[in-house]
Image: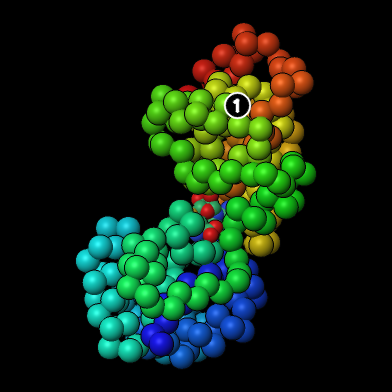
Amino acid sequence: MPTLYIVPTPIGNLDEMTPRAIEVLKNVDVIACEDTRNSMKLLQYFDIHTRFVQYHNFNEQESSKGLLQLLEQGKNVAVISDAGYPLISDPGQVIVNKAIALGYNVVPLSGCNAMLNALVASGLITQPFTFIGFLPANQKESVKTLNLYKHYPMTLIFYEAPHRIEKMLASVLEALGDRQVCVARELTKKHEEFIRGCCSEVLEEIKGAKGEMVVVVEGFNEELKPAIDMGEITLLVEEAI
Ligand code: SAM
């Protein structure tokens, strides 16, 4: 039976590539890559010479047609993204859904993913949790989105780009209050770091920080009293935006 493999790749430390991932990528007929230049480096590093095609956010529909044709011809396909799991804030959803609908085998491999690394080391409650991914870039829109989760009694996990981290934490402060947060930075890499504390403290500490980041935020808890008053929150938010 033709199979579509969902293959996670390292989020930093290449030693986290699993032997099974290497084996699958060596043996499938085609690898669908988010960014071929980026994936080429990874494939070369692991001595993988399989044919690859581009499959990214802007050609998912079109590219998945070609991948389905390969599955129809009895070929095996693997989908990878630039880092971590495909489909997790990355392309992959379209081909996986189509493959399921047409009855092909869909096989996920275990492996790297930034949100779970961040969650388990955050010091915040690990269950239940909600993964939100990226908030809208626009400040007003991101506060609006955060308001949807304001009363969720579960840990919230976000992805964020380093140049937006201050604005993002300011939105969290404005919409959710001064909750406990953990910013997990440069996971699995040399300068891995976890910045934990109230949102207002972390916002101060994060200034100028670089690298990739995951933000884990405490869920709603009725017993929690705001650590600082609204005046101070407004000041911190104004400073960050
Ligand atoms: N597919 C990936 C996964 O499974 O985690 C996520 C890809 S998403 C496009 C990229 C975002 O993931 C980054 O902006 C950052 O929020 C997070 N991320 C990826 N690698 C990371 C790392 N080494 N340390 C911290 N965050 C990381």
Report the residue at 56% width, 21% height from top: 174
- Residue 80 appears in the picture as rendered: yes
Q: Position of residue 216 (x, y in %)?
A: 64, 41
- Label 1 C-beta lies within 8 Å of the nearest ligand 1 atom: no
Depicted 233 relative to depicted 75: above or below: above
Q: Residue furthest top?
A: 231
Report the residue at 28% width, 83% height from top: 72
Q: Position of residue 191 (x, y in %)?
A: 68, 56
- Residue 195 appears in the picture as rendered: no
Amino acid found under the numbered disc labelled 1: His
Residue 221 placement, left or right of 10: right
The secondary structure type at the circle numbered 1 is: loop
Report the residue at 33% width, 89% height from top: 74
Residue 83 placement, left or right of 202: left
Q: Where is residue 55 in the image (x, y as percent from the top left)?
A: 32, 68
Depicted 125 relative to depicted 69: above or below: above
Depicted 75 relative to depicted 100: above or below: below
Location of residue 67 (image quadrant): bottom left
Can you identify the residue that label 1 sits on?
Answer: 151
Nearer to us in this view, 193 or 230: 230
Report the residue at 55% width, 23% height from top: 175
Q: Where is residue 126 in the image (x, y as percent from the top left)?
A: 72, 47
